[in-house]
């Protein structure tokens, strides 16, 4: 019904089209229920702090930053916020969960889409409380700070936050409300 004849679509395309129609239908249902999450993040928008703690390693793509466990200097495309194991981690802004995964360096992680090309990845997590495709409100529980991976044993427990705008890393501290 979107100008594409179903018989000209391959199996994957038909499935994608059905998924899009289903998501569109769900969005209408949510709008009717008044539960639409506003993921309209912009350059002047702010994120709430997702976890209590101080910045352990800052963002810097211009100069190298020292990573003690690795005993090397490298650019830092993320911010590492020191925190205790088991500390709750909250969504910094209304968002949609794009991916939930595991990476040997940042451990369990969740990638959320804020809107307008802004994407945030939270890493070093345990007990993730959300599912892929979920819409989250600002301040909603994502999970808890995990024990550090072997890449951060000296730095200790922390939350990893990487923020991207249109595929380019940006400093999350420029958007965190503090």
Image (cartoon, rainbow, N blue to C red):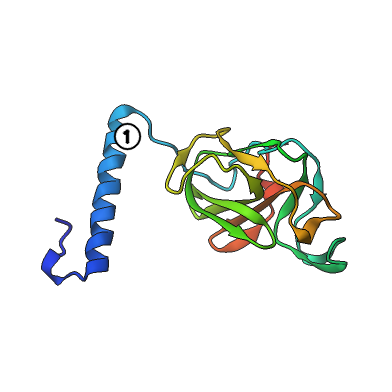
Disc 1: CA contacts within 10 A as few (<14), some (14-19) or many (>=20) = few
Name the residue furthest top.
Answer: 33
Q: Which residue is painted at 28% across and 53% down in the image?
A: 20
Q: Which residue corresponds to mark 1? A: 30
Q: Would residue 111 be found to the left or right of residue 144 on screen?
A: left
Q: Is residue 109 visible?
A: yes
Q: Would residue 128 be found to the left or right of residue 39 on screen?
A: right
The one nearer the camera, 59 or 125, is 125
Q: Which residue is painted at 55% across and 56% down in the image?
A: 101
Q: Would residue 96 be found to the left or right of residue 107 on screen?
A: left
Q: Which residue is painted at 47% across and 43% down in the image?
A: 40
Q: Position of residue 14 (x, y in %)?
A: 22, 63
User: Mark 1 falls on what kind of element?
Assistant: helix
Q: Which residue is painted at 56% across and 39% down in the image?
A: 93
The one nearer the camera, 13 or 59, is 13
Q: Can you tell which quarter of the image residue 15 is in?
A: bottom left
Query: Considering only vertical position in the picture, is 65 above or below 57?
Result: below
Q: Position of residue 104 (x, y in %)?
A: 67, 63
For the C terminus, which image quadrant? top right
For the N terminus, which image quadrant? bottom left
Q: Position of residue 157 (x, y in %)?
A: 78, 47
Q: Position of residue 25 (x, y in %)?
A: 25, 43
Q: Can you tell which quarter of the image residue 59 is in?
A: bottom right
Q: Would residue 161 be found to the left or right of residue 18 on screen?
A: right
């Amino acid at each position: 019904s979107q100008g594409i004849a179903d018989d000209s679509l391959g199996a994957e395309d038909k499935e994608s089209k059905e998924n899009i129609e289903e998501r569109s239908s769900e969005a209408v249902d949510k709008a009717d229920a008044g539960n639409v999450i506003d993921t309209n993040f912009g350059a002047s928008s702010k994120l709430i702090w997702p976890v209590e703690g101080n910045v352990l390693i800052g963002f810097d793509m211009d100069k190298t930053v020292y990573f003690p466990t690795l005993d090397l200097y490298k650019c830092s495309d993320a911010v590492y916020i020191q925190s205790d194991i088991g500390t709750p981690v909250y969504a910094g802004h209304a968002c949609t969960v794009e991916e939930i995964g595991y990476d040997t360096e940042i451990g369990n992680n969740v990638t959320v889409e804020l809107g307008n090309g802004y994407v945030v990845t939270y890493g070093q997590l345990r007990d993730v409380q959300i599912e892929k495709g979920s819409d989250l409100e600002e301040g909603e529980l994502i999970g808890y700070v995990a024990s550090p991976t072997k890449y951060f044993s000296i730095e200790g427990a922390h939350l990893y936050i990487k923020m991207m705008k249109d595929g380019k890393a940006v400093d999350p501290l420029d958007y965190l409300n503090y």
